[in-house]
Amino acid sequence: MEHTAIKLATNGLTHGGYDKMWNVDSNHNIKIFTEDEIKRITSNYSTPIGNGGFGDVFKGVIDDEHDLVAVKRYIHTDVRADFMKEVSSHNQISHKNTVKLIGYCTSENTLTIVTEFMPNGNLEAILHNSDISIPLDTRLGIAIGCAEVLSYMHTMHLSNGNLVYHGDIKPANILLGDNLTAKVSDFGLSRLLAGGVTQYTSIIKGTINYMDPIYLRMGCLTPRSDVYSFGIILLELITRKRVKERNINLIESVSEVRTKKEVLKLVDAEIANEGNLDTLEEIMKLAIECLMMEIDKRPRMKNVTKRLVKLWRGVRGAQDIGWLKKGSRFFKWNNAANSEKLGNVRKFMAQELNEITKNYSSAIFHIDSIGSWYRGTLEDNTLVVLEKTDKDDRHSDYSDYRKASIRNAAMISSHISHKNILNLLGCCLEGEFPALVHEYTLLGGPSMTYSCLGNMMTTTISH
């Protein structure tokens, strides 16, 4: 579905500052490609994998690393300002549930953006153009991944009073990685709202079927418009129906549901059973709240995320534990300086690690006197590898010693970004055996190196 641009009668409306250019910060991890390099990467644009109002997307391979990438090529080359704004905004949004930006090209004849390749396509195709089985907990995981990155965007600049919203949340812009982990893409319509206040624009851009009616009618720029679009995503996830198809309007259909029987009739047959009924009702209730016409009554994405995780835990048969109970998603040190050094690293509870690893049932390998490595899955379907230390009788103060080592490793790893180092997602300091939690990769090449339990040793995982 292509973007639509509508110009409202100006009547005192302003552009709300969205024409303001965001400068691309210096980032050594972002590469500037030449036109010849782009042609080589894509084998002269030989493998198309998608398209839209902006242009086409092609599959490619970076020669020296054999990494699969997606190359988004703009049809028009006279939109450089919009192109650079998309590159800049994407570059500033660093979150595990956003598609990784690798680089871009701004030659005279082409504008292209290079990102990581997502092996499972997008949510639109998975939901509506395939018959792949998607259990309820996996659907919740997709919703959680999307909700987490929107919550991050809506609060990432709160320290200086600014807010960011995506502006084009729809199934086609939610890409799916290994294990159907959701990653949000396409930041061409993202807005930086200076001062965090609602602003207005006279030019409406986006996809009408997923667009906030208040934004469409009044040009109102607010993160709560993302919340509205996300509400539609929730409905499509549980019904496996498009928001508008033929003469059926999914939002209207949901608003007419009155009984439990009608709930089961509306949702996708794969998940429509009595055991899921309470969860489905809660998801539908949350979606309706997101779709409220009174903008201020729509929930914030942070609250949406918490409610979804609670539902996910219920489906998985877990207790309401961890950061939901503590009211904090991120690791907090007693020392404020240490907190700044660590960054956004999640503090896991020991019971959460049991749940994530299914009681440590999927071991990868073990090294005596150092520790063991286990596979696991987070709430948003992210595959992880957990490093758990072994007991070491050489240290009488073993517990404090290992916790200090883990703390130091977490501080260092949280500030290291490299394709051959597993991304640190969190750590656990509870109990006798502290642990680190890394993002697990299935497509990282023949080997993957990372720090080992606070000693900064390097270990190789063979795939």
Image: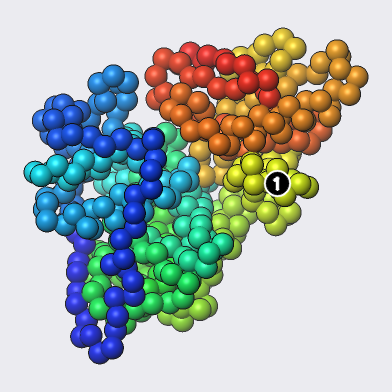
Residue 148: % across, % down: 51, 53
Residue 91: % across, % down: 38, 47
In this orientation, which residue lies closer to the viewer: 285 or 45? 45
Q: Which residue is mark 1?
A: 337
Quadrant of the image occupied by residue 89: bottom left
SS label for mark 1: helix
Q: Mark 1 packing: few (<14 Cα in 10 Å), some, or many (20+)?
A: few
Location of the N terminus by quadrant is bottom left
Quadrant of the image occupied by residue 179: top left
Residue 286: % across, % down: 52, 66
Residue that protrudes farthest toward the front in the picture: 26
Above or below for 426 versus 230: above
**What residue is rendered at 73% in x and 54% in y?**
325
**What residue is rendered at 63% in x and 21% in y?**
456
Location of the C terminus by quadrant is top left
Horizontal placement of 310 versus 319: left or right?
left
Above or below for 3 versus 37: below
Residue that protrudes farthest toward the right in the picture: 396
**What residue is rendered at 57% in x and 27% in y?**
385
Q: Is residue 271 shown to the viewer in this render?
A: no
**What residue is rendered at 41% in x and 15% in y?**
446
Residue that protrudes farthest toward the top in the picture: 368
Q: Is residue 76 shown to the viewer in this render?
A: yes
In this orientation, which residue lies closer to the viewer: 208 or 20? 20
Horizontal placement of 413 versus 20: left or right?
right
Above or below for 305 versus 28: below
Three-letter code for the amino acid on which mark 1 is drawn: Ala
Above or below for 457 versus 10: above
Q: Looking at the image, how many numbered discs can be counted on the residues?
A: 1
Quadrant of the image occupied by residue 58: top left
In this orientation, which residue lies closer to the viewer: 269 or 420? 420
Residue 283: % across, % down: 52, 61
